Amino acid sequence: MSAASVAPSAPQKTNYDVVIIGGAMMGSSTAWFLASNPDFDGSVLVVERDLTFQKSSTMHSNSCMRQQYSTRLNIQISQFAADYVKNFRNFMGGDTRVPVLSIQNFGYLYLADQPAFAQVLRDNQKLQKAQGAGTRILTPNEIRAEYPFYNLDDILLGSINTLDEGYWDSGTVFEWWRRSAREKGVEYVGNEVVGITCASGGARVQSVTLATGQVVAAGVVVNASGPRGARTAQMAGIDLPVEARKRFTWVFSAQSPLDRNLPLTIDPSGVHVRQDGPKTYMAGGHTAEDPAVDFDDFTMDHNLWESHVWPIIATRIPQFECLKIITEWAGHYAYNLLDQNAIIGPHDQMKNFMFINGFSGHGLQQSPAMGRGMAELITYGAYRSLDLSDFGYARVRSATAIKERAII
């Protein structure tokens, strides 16, 4: 029986210590880490507008993780994710019902065709190596030796890491976070927050109003609304630079399959392609114009494949000249207009309104560290495991961007 069929629309109580708006990956990560923290003894309500999650960014993700970032904190966040996935059953308390997971380490391969980006990759590799990542810089000849199927005539160098980089089963983690959180007392309702009431002067959030009319008092409100994060924030009178941006995915088979796993290859054009199944591949990209889209706009741009994505893939990997599309979909990034990095933590004035927003395509791989950090903030008033304060709302207020040079 699905979660949507058993979850009520009305909450059991009128007052909760924590109300989480949005029950997808970030909301459920936060809920699970709260419920699993022995120092937290409060009540938690998760309000999710669609408990099938069919239109969520979580369900449309390509489920990859990488350590090839240009900032120390983003690297460390992904390193915790890798540890969490590889030791998932242990993190879930040793529950033998929980499956043992692993990472399919086909890696990420960034390709540089310009000297400036080649230098960025060299600089990034030094930082990644200092943090314990296994990133290597490869010349075109070295790439050919390991992956002879690429056309590298225009490439100066590449950057690859096949240690804790690749595909992971985010769906299983998401399922078990929700299931375990419920078993630990977290309440999920299929409803929508349509209003937020703040105290006079805007110092605190007092309550949320649901689409079905109930008013629920809250000690803390967590905005885990994904691409709808700005709409949720606006209910509290807060501006948040997050909007929905459309991203397209295609899964295909090749008439001439490769003889080895394909790393997630980031072409200089921005198109990316990777191994998906034993004989299938996954590609992603977006249109040259990248506007904000309506939250319910998941229409495919079929011309994009024929005119842009496929020609680039077939040029880079000539064996992919003859392909067959198996499935395709459009999903949404919760795109942070400031710097495409996370926004997490309390509002600078309304201290009990918490953000966990703006992940810009990195949310699933960052969800273990972000949920843990949010739970620590709520429980202790400070981060304890990994200091995520660089991603706080203060930088939004001052328009101070984090310079992450490895955005996809």
Image (cartoon, rainbow, N blue to C red):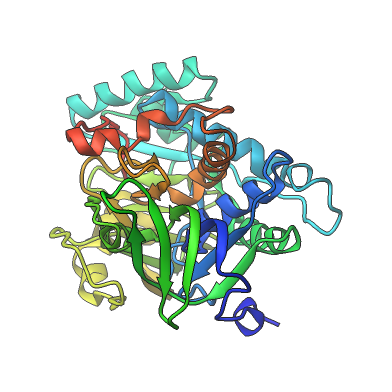
Instruction: Answer above or below: position of 372 versus 13.
Output: above
Placement of 242 over or under 203, stated as above or below: below
Q: Quadrant of residue 406?
A: top left
Query: In what quadrant of the picture does the C terminus appear?
Result: top left
| Occupied quadrant, residue 132 | top right
Q: Is residue 178 found left or right of 393 in the rendered image?
A: right
Image coordinates for residue 100, horizontal then vertical, percent: 77, 50
Farthest-out residue, right: 96
Residue placed most toward the observer, 171 or 177: 177
Residue drawn at x 38%, y 59% is 226
Camera sees residue 91: yes
The residue closer to the viewer here, 248 or 113, is 248
Q: Nearer the viewer, residue 43 or 94?
A: 43
Q: Can you name the residue that lies furthest to the left here?
A: 289
Q: Is residue 79 left or right of residue 407?
A: right
- Where does the image place residue 77, in percent across and percent down from the top left? 50, 34
Q: Position of residue 298 (x, y in %)?
A: 31, 75
The image shows residue 357, relative to residue 116, as above or below, that is below
Counting labels gives 0
Asked where in the image residue 114 lies, by quadrant, the reply is top left
The residue shown at (49%, 58%) is: 218
* Vertical placement of residue 147 versus 230, above or below: above
Q: Residue at x 25, y 51 (%)?
A: 240
Across and down, in percent, residue 250 comes to 39, 67
Q: Quadrant of the N terminus?
A: bottom right
